[in-house]
């Protein structure tokens, strides 16, 4: 179990480095021979006979998919609906990529996506969905619904999905109330992206397995006390471009040993919040910070007690290098990048 989790984390961490990339699927092959049963509008490479590439074809419909196809690429078309029967031959489909189309929720007919019991990846970003498609396969391990028109994500939508590791819901119109109970029981969830929505608080009830939580560009003004203590695996937390103020940050809420990266940039903080000495990257640029309390980063300094911070960004605040306490070099002895301006 540990080795599997390590491999999953490696793939998700690559998304963390390239933090805001939306796509990671293979591009369509160029001018290659297709298998005999491939539909005319698409390509089914002989070298990859279980894949059907129908992307970037100006298609207005989903063609009837022939048997044997496991990976279906339909991104970047003009598709407006999914008609019954198109997936009847491929109920064991594993990947379905539908990004960048014009599909609305009421145009997904029954007996289509809900028949795909072996589906592992569903990419449905940049369409016109007002509710999540479903019911979805219990085999799903990744769900992308970026850039739709979701206002709610009903409790139970993801029920029983024990393999689900990543959920991408950024660039919608979701509210905190609209996410209530949405992530309950997801034992394997590692990445949750709810950035660029209308949240006033971090999502409640997220599973303790979470490694990465992205909530940038919302209306969050406070962090509940003990929120991170309930997430013992959390390593990356991003809450930039929100409305956080000092009074909304309970003492020690970010002082957890698992956290490696904390992004609180572009908020309204006036002081550096208390963090754990194991934190490696702290982003506080463009706040209203006017004092540098070293004890927020190092409780005390000794040969074995010091901060593991490598990156500290304080540019766009009301402090300069001259505000750094005398013992800063001992506390931040591993820092390779401290930015004030």
Image: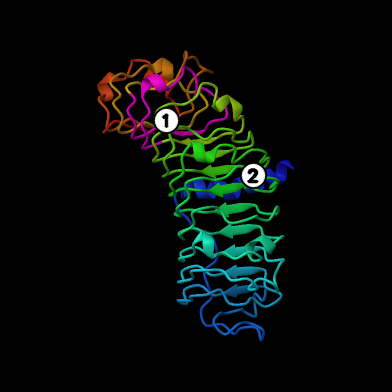
Count of numbered circles on the image: 2
Q: Position of residue 93 (x, y in %)?
A: 68, 66
- The image shows residue 66, relative to residue 71, as above or below, that is below
Q: Quadrant of residue 200?
A: top left
Horizontal side of residue 299 vs 162, given as left or right: left
Residue range (magenta): 240-269
Judge by depth and name the residue closer to the eye, 22 or 114.
114
What kind of element bears circle 1?
Answer: loop
What kind of element bears circle 2?
Answer: loop
Q: Quadrant of residue 126?
A: bottom left
Horizontal side of residue 1 vs 198, given as left or right: right
Judge by depth and name the residue closer to the eye, 338 or 198.
198
- Mark number displayed over residue 166: none
Q: Position of residue 51 (x, y in %)?
A: 63, 72
- The image shows residue 279, relative to residue 35, as above or below, that is above
Location of the C terminus (image quadrant)? top left
**Magenta stretch: dominant secondary structure:** loop
Residue, disc 1 = 335
Residue, disc 2 = 156
């Amino acid at each position: 179990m540990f080795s599997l989790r390590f491999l999953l984390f490696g793939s998700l961490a690559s998304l963390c480095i390239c933090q805001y990339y939306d796509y990671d699927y293979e591009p369509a092959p160029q001018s290659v021979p297709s298998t005999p049963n491939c539909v005319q509008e698409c390509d089914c490479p002989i070298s990859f006979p279980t894949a059907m590439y129908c992307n970037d074809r100006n298609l207005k419909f989903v063609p009837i998919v022939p048997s044997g196809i496991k990976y279906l690429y339909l991104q970047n078309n003009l598709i407006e609906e999914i008609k019954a029967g198109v997936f009847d031959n491929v109920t064991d489909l594993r990947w379905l990529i539908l990004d960048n189309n014009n599909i609305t929720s009421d145009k997904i007919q029954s007996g289509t996506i809900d028949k795909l019991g072996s589906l592992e990846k569903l990419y449905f970003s940049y369409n016109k969905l007002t509710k999540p498609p479903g019911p979805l396969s219990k085999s799903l391990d990744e769900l992308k619904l970026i850039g739709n028109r979701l206002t709610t994500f009903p409790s139970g939508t993801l029920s029983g999905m024990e393999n689900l590791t990543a959920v991408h819901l950024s660039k919608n119109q979701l509210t905190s109330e609209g996410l209530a109970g949405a992530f309950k029981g997801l034992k394997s969830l590692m990445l949750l992206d709810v950035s660029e929505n209308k949240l006033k608080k971090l999502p409640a009830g997220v599973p303790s397995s979470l490694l990465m939580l992205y909530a940038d560009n919302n209306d969050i003004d406070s962090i509940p006390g003990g929120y991170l203590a309930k997430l013992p695996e959390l390593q990356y937390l991003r809450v930039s471009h929100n409305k956080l103020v000092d009074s909304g940050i309970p003492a020690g809420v970010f002082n957890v040993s698992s956290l490696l990266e904390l992004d609180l940039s572009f908020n309204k903080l006036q002081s550096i919040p208390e963090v754990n000495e194991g934190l490696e990257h702290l982003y506080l640029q463009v706040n209203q910070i006017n004092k540098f309390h070293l004890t927020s980063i190092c409780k005390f300094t000794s040969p074995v007690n010091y901060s593991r911070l490598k990156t500290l960004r304080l540019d766009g605040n009301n402090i300069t290098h001259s505000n750094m306490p005398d013992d800063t070099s001992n506390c931040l002895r591993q820092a390779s990048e401290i930015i004030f301006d």
